[in-house]
Image (cartoon, rainbow, N blue to C red):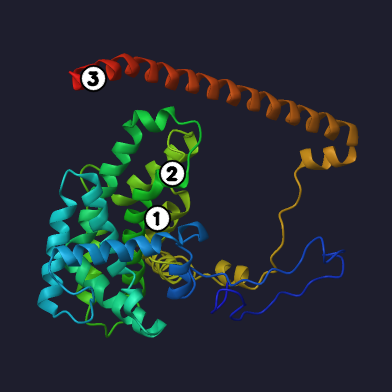
Amino acid sequence: MGTNGNGRRGGAKLHMEEGDCNNDMESPELDFVYDDCDTQANEIAELYSYTEHPEFQLNVKAFEEIMEEFNFPPSWQRLTESQRRTIIMKLLEYLDLAVNDIRMRAARCILYLAQGCWAEMQSDAEQAHWARLNIFNLYEMGVFSAFVELLNLEIVRSSTSTVASRKLAESLADSTHLRVILSVLYLITEHMRTESYNENSEYQHLVQLFKEELGTPYGEELLPVQLLNMVTHICAGTASHFPMKKVLLLLWKILLVYLGGIKELKDRKMKLREKYGLAPIAEDTLEVVKGMRASSPPPSAVDMIENQNPSQRKIKDVDRAMRRQTFMKQTSLDESDEQIYVDKEETKLKPKLSILHVLQAI
């Protein structure tokens, strides 16, 4: 990745021998930079997928509806600092309600604030300015910890949901609540990470407080442990609707904020070697890797044998096709069972409905 997410920012290439690559088409040059992360704008853009584009309008709608309920104009810029803090406090109260729809509407409104109230901004720079300002106001008022509690609640609700366990196929709608919660947590974490490099920032005390908060357990476990448990559920197939990409991105950024990146690792290694009387490292492995040519890993022994024996590969392809066909048959059976279950439920309701109609007629 580069400064704009596409090109290389710099770095020397290692010299290639003539026999290193016989065919450039088989092993093309990959343009990348070996670093912790890209620019903040690109890292935030990485959070969203194309399928989430319609949900941006839902965030705006939630914001406008809540502002109307609070008797405020639907323009964040026109409000005073006191009015903004009052609205955030009311949104936090909504997050504590038992009604799921109200709770998630407040979460969408907070997500819209964390995104910089983009609908009323005239430029990207203006949106980035308000996003930064809102993020630190949200964190200062306890939004991060409130959303961690929401995340725990949603994980438990998703894991114990009998409806989710009966569904044959997961859809994008199944992860809507989790995606909203993880997006808010990610945006706060990413801004904290970026702000930590600005030594003259007026928010340095909040950055330090955020690092300390990450080292404090929420309930029984640390937040990174909770995210790793989510990854475990995804890999085990018990919660396939969890948004894996957002979980991994949030986990990655939390580790960068709390533990540091490549530079911090290098400094730590040097201090430890000096402490135990070891000679300093003559050649930095990370610096060597930055200049290496990107290439695919060598083929395994099994792949080489299969390529040399076409008949064996053909048998494997046939076996794979038979497994796919068996799976499709099983899916059809499951769909039939599901339809039978629905028909039974409808049959149970029909006598009740007819009795109700008789009573109404009387």
Identify the residue position indicated by label 2 in the image.
Answer: 231
Question: In the visual, does 77 lie left or right of 83?
Answer: right
Q: Reading the chain from its start, which is encountered first: label 1 or label 3?
A: 1
Q: Nearer the viewer, residue 258 or 272?
A: 258
1 or 3: mark nearer the eye: 3
Residue 292 percent location from the top left of the image: 67, 69
Q: Which mark is residue 6?
A: none
Q: Residues within 10 Å of mark 2 (few under 14, many from 20)?
A: many
Q: Is residue 85 visible?
A: yes
Image quadrant holding the C terminus, namely top left
Which residue corresponds to the image point at 20% horizontal and 22% vertical from the top-left?
Answer: 360
Question: Which SS class for mark 2?
Answer: helix
Identify the residue position indicated by label 3 in the image.
Answer: 356
Q: Is residue 141 visible?
A: no
Q: Amino acid at mark 3?
A: Leu
Q: Amino acid at mark 1?
A: Leu
Question: Which SS class for mark 1?
Answer: helix
Question: Which SS class for mark 3?
Answer: helix
Q: Reading the chain from its start, which is encountered first: label 2 or label 1?
A: 2
Image quadrant holding the N terminus, namely bottom right
Q: Reading the chain from its start, which is encountered first: label 2 or label 3?
A: 2
Q: Which mark is residue 251?
A: 1
